[in-house]
Image: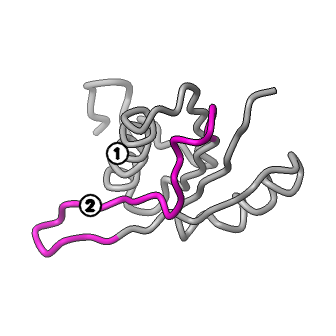
Amino acid sequence: MAKYLVASFPWSSDVGIDVANALGLTHVVLETKQFPDGESYVRYPVDVSTYDGLILIQRAYPEQNTRLIQAMLAIHAARDLGVKHVHVILPYLPTQGRTGGLGTVSQ
């Protein structure tokens, strides 16, 4: 059986705890910071290379652009560390709701 970990960002830890409890998995909260130039830093507090899979939980609201980049950084880091399967849960996924469609601005 594959060994999975649930990891969430600090602002998504309530969802992460609920998912981990429902699945009987270990939950960790990612360490994050933002540098003065706006660059994001994401770190796993445990050795994720010992896991086959990861369930990553990230709320993408507010600051949708930054939070999506943080999710991508966390996915990339997990894959670089040898995690074979990464599943992402985004309770809020930004859409093109304020425009008339992709690339078209409503007046």
Between 49 and 105, the residue placed more toward the observer is 49
- Taking the spot 59% from the left edge, 42% from the top edge, the residue there is 50
From the image, tell me which residue sits under label 1. Answer: 73
Instruction: Please name the amino acid that badge 2 sits on.
Output: Ser
With 67 as the anchor, is 8 left or right in this view? right
Between 61 and 20, the residue placed more toward the observer is 20
Which numbered disc flags the more N-terminal residue, 2 or 1? 2
Q: Is residue 11 above or below residue 98?
A: below
Residue 84 located within the stretch drawn in magenta: no
With 106 as the anchor, is 12 left or right in this view? right
With 47 as the anchor, is 76 left or right in this view? left
With 24 as the anchor, is 90 left or right in this view? left
Between 30 and 80, the residue placed more toward the observer is 80
From the image, tell me which residue sits under label 2. Answer: 40
- Taking the spot 87% from the left edge, 50% from the top edge, the residue there is 24
Location of residue 98 in the rendering, given as x and y in whole percent from the top left corner: 40, 42
Instruction: Please name the amino acid that badge 1 sits on.
Output: Leu
Q: Is residue 99 above or below residue 22?
A: above
Location of residue 62 in the rendering, given as x and y in whole percent from the top left corner: 45, 63
**Distance of mark 2 from mark 1, alpha carbons?**
8 Å
CB contact under 8 Å: marks 2 and 1: yes
Determine which quarter of the picture holds residue 90.
top right
Q: Residue furthest front?
A: 50
* Range of residues picked out in magenta: 33-54
Location of the C terminus (image quadrant): top left
Residue 39 located within the stretch drawn in magenta: yes
- Taking the spot 38% from the left edge, 29% from the top edge, the residue there is 100
Q: Give the class, few, some or many, for how many residues have Cα within 10 Å of label 1's Cα (few <14, many ≥20).
A: some
Location of the N terminus (image quadrant): top right
Between 97 and 107, the residue placed more toward the observer is 97
